[in-house]
Image: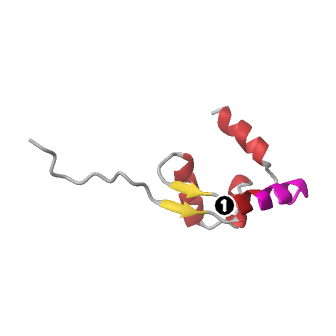
Amino acid sequence: MPFSGKIKLEMDTYVVDTHALAWFVSEDKRLSPRATQILSQAEAGEVQVLIPTLVLAELTHIAQKKRVKVTIEEQKRENQSR
């Protein structure tokens, strides 16, 4: 008997901007609860967040200028240790 229910194969997809990503990785309280929820869901693999190349370039720039508390390298190490 074939399955008659619907299965959602696509996951919700969002695009992140520089401020939201910087605030998320540095756990800055300026990030809205909704953005925090979406980025946390992305970490858990529940949604997909696209990061434009320009956002990565800007984040690298502000990290080098010490305007963000956590660098991408530190975030990678933290994720690998989980």
Q: Is residue 28 visible?
A: no
Q: Circle 1 sits in a helix, a strand or a loop, which is it? A: loop
Q: What residue lies at 43% left-to-right and 55% top-to-bottom?
A: 11
Front residue of this view, candidates 6 and 74: 6
Reading the image, the residue beneath label 1 is 52
Disc 1: CA contacts within 10 A as few (<14), some (14-19) or many (>=20):
few
Residue 61 in the image: state x and y as whole percent. Answer: 85, 58
Q: Quadrant of residue 10?
A: bottom left
Q: Count the labels in the image.
A: 1
Q: Amino acid at mark 1?
A: Pro
Q: Give the x, y percent position of residue 60.
A: 81, 55
Relative placement, left or right, of 20 versus 36 is right
Q: Name the image quarter holding residue 27.
A: bottom right
**Residue 37: in magenta span:** no
Comparing 62 with 9, the one in front is: 9
- Identified at 54% across, 59% down, the residue is 38
Q: Which residues are magenta?
A: 57-68
Residue 58 part of the magenta segment? yes
